[in-house]
Image (cartoon, rainbow, N blue to C red):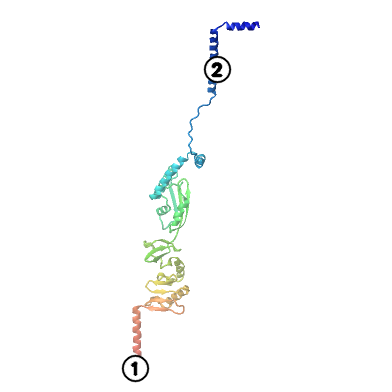
Amino acid sequence: MDGAGRLTRSLRSLGPQADLRAAAIGAAVLLREYVGAHLARRRRRPAKRPQVIIDREPPNRYILMVERYLPRRIGLVATLAILFGSLGLGIVKGGHVEEFTTALSDARNALANTAGFRITTVGINGRKQLSQDEVLAIGGVNGRSSLLFLDADTVRAKLKANPWIADATILKLYPGRLQIDIVERTAFALWQQNGRLSVIASDGAVLEPYVSRRFLNLPLVVGKGADVRAHDFLALLDRYPQVRSVTKAAIFVGERRWNLRLKDGLDVRLPENDVGNALAALSRLDKDEKLFSRDIVAVDMRLPDRLIVQLSEDAGKARDELFKDKKSKKKAGDSA
């Protein structure tokens, strides 16, 4: 109790100055605690987030799916596709496809030739009617072609498309040799239709228009369908050389039967069937009766049981006068 009384007395004895000092110390402590707590809260506070403006209408879910699943740089790819598409459309619309393709091919071949794949040697076997330059031109091989990018199948197809070439073989021998072996068709006959004269092969393929006199000695066939039927008929005619030697042209009539036009203008009308026997009979008549040397213009063999001979106009008049003379002499004898 004494100690407590002494403490009370000591505090009271300080007076008003001691109260002010104590209040100031308390205020300082409170301020320090407030500032420390405020600083601690600032350290714990997260960084300020950027302001986000939310549109009232949510984005379309399909747009979100496209943005999520489309690969990166799709915009660049689409732009390039549009540009190349426009370029291709312009080339097609302007009719420059062939020129563009040729330019690309020439550029590619130039690179290959620079790399050592230039065609330096060309060997061609089997040609008779066509020259070497013609064979190369038909196959599409020129001075810009490279062996590396030469398509053997394409060259072969181009060669076989020519009527003179029945077959072809292409060999690429690297680095610079090209070997071409061809099988040519043989000129078999001249075929005339609608006033046009063409050189044909034995299978009827038209080889070229008739412009060269080197084909002058070929047999002549005339008429629609004569081109594909000529081989069999001329083979049959060859069995009778006496008839074949004097034949100028074989004429296919109505796509059914043949007529012969002889060199002296005589027409021989053959039957539709049994042509071999008719040709044999015709050969015997000339051998025995000199039929082809007589003054006649036509021999009709279409009927199986008879032969009809048409005389020339002069021979007909001479025959009529001969009959008149015979009749007049007969009448004179009867009157005597």
Q: Residues within 10 Å of mark 2 (few under 14, many from 20)?
A: few
The residue that label 1 is drawn on is: 335
Which quarter of the figure has residue 307?
bottom left
Which of the two residues, 297 or 48, is positioned nearer the viewer here?
A: 48
Instruction: Report the front residue among 41 and 243.
Output: 41
User: Where 303 sits versus 328, above or below?
Assistant: above
Question: Which amino acid type is marked by label 2?
Answer: Glu
Position of the N terminus by quadrant: top right
Binning the other alpha carbons within 10 Å of mark 1 as few (below 14), some (14 to 19) or many (20 upward) gives few
| Sequence-first tag of 2 and 1 | 2
Q: Amino acid at mark 1?
A: Ser
Q: Could you tell me how many numbered marks the image carries?
A: 2
Q: Is residue 15 above or below residue 42?
A: above
- Residue 305 placed where, x, y %? 46, 79
Horizontally, residue 146 falls left or right of residue 327, namely: right
Residue 218, by quadrant, is bottom left
- In percent of width and height, residue 213 lies at 36, 62
Residue at (54% x, 12% y) in the render: 23
Quadrant containing the C terminus is: bottom left
Where disc 2 sits, the SS reads helix
* Visible residue check, residue 196: yes
Q: Position of residue 16 (x, y in %)?
A: 54, 8
Residue shown at the point (40%, 78%) measured from the top left: 309
Which disc, if any, is residue 33? 2
